Image (cartoon, rainbow, N blue to C red):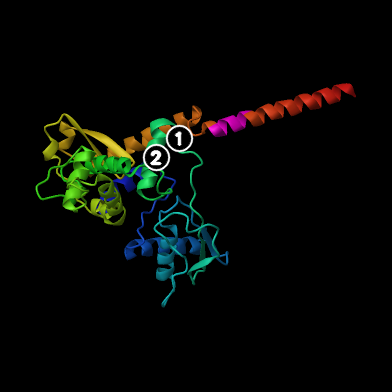
Amino acid sequence: MEERVQPFQRAMASKFPDQKVLFASWNRARDIRALSELLVNVAREHPYRSELNVLVVGMPNVGKSTLLNALRNIGIAGPTPKALRTSAQPGMTRVLSTRLKLSVDPLVYAYDSPGVMLPFLGKGMVGAERGVKLALIAGIKEGLYDTEALASYLLYRLNVLDPVSPAYLKLLPPDTPPLLDVQEFLALLARRLCMLKRGGIPDSARAAVWFIKWWREEGGLASASAPALPDCSGVSGLETHRRGWGFDLEWNVDAAEASRYDEATIQAKMEDCIDRFEEAASLEEREGGSVSSTQEKKRLKEQQKARQRARSKARLASRK
């Protein structure tokens, strides 16, 4: 899994040399130990301070509390009880927590915080896709999105991540080729799981719910554990095809690139994705795409009230 992260780490270091990016998974002791050592080293760089206080900030349901519990287990000698409650659903942490000790020498404390959600996900297809991504990881309330729509997007993404041997093939009968049509996929999955309605009709709705649950609990890990440089020969007949990493980085690979698809190529593609993301974010900000119509109406109303107050003050001043 680590070798899949390295091109992205190098891409981030190239684009943002003044920032430090550390990837850590709570269930990998090596990652937690590295993060703990990083915090301890920061504290030791400031010996004149009696303690270091760390604030953990992040989107809902990304595992902030779980990460802090793991850091406490690594940093405090002896058995340590689970200090923060965790849940598979967003919203467990509702207020800023009390301080949690992560290290004794030097003293390092951390505060857990409620998930930070964007007030508005964006307009049109851009905002809709952001919402689907959050729904797939249970980052927003269940029921806001149709499960079959989520399953369709997940199927597309898994095909992009590995068009030759996507992670979901292990769920289907042997020798099943990659599938593009979500209805065909869900029908096949429903039969495989014996999820049938009266008359032997596949229950696609139940299969979609199961597929999303599988992704959250084990499918994401299975996809991340796939070979870092999968064989592209299975799609070499196409002039270009889509590849990607995670759910946010996606690019085209032409026939010439497929023949030399190595980590350097992947890093260059990732750097291009980062550039395009920053350009799109700047454009969205300039065009007001990050502000909802409700927020915009509220802002205009406040401006109108401010102008009315100014005119009233001017009239009162002229009468004196």
Q: Secondary structure at mark 1?
A: loop
- Residue 290 position in % (x across, y down): 49, 34
State the mark number for residue 130: 2
Q: Residue furthest bottom?
A: 78
For disc 2, the neighbor class at 10 Å (few under 14, some 14 to 19, many from 20) is some
Query: In the rendered structure, are the residues bearing label 1 and label 2 in contact, judged by CB atoms less than 8 Å apart?
Result: yes
Q: Which residue is mark 1?
A: 122
Identify the mark at residue 284; answer none if there is no mark.
none
User: Does 125 appear above or below 56?
Assistant: above
State the SS at label 2.
Answer: helix
Q: Classify residue 226 as left or right of residue 64.
A: left
Name which quarter of the figure residue 77 lies in.
Answer: bottom left
User: Residue at the spot x=71%, y=26% of the render?
Assistant: 307
Give, as a three-letter code, the residue at label 2: Arg
Instruction: Please provide percent x and percent y for residue 179.
Output: 18, 40
In the image, residue 9 above or below residue 48: above
User: Which quarter of the rendering shows the N terminus?
Assistant: bottom left
| Magenta stretch bounds | 294-300
Q: Is residue 299 magenta?
A: yes
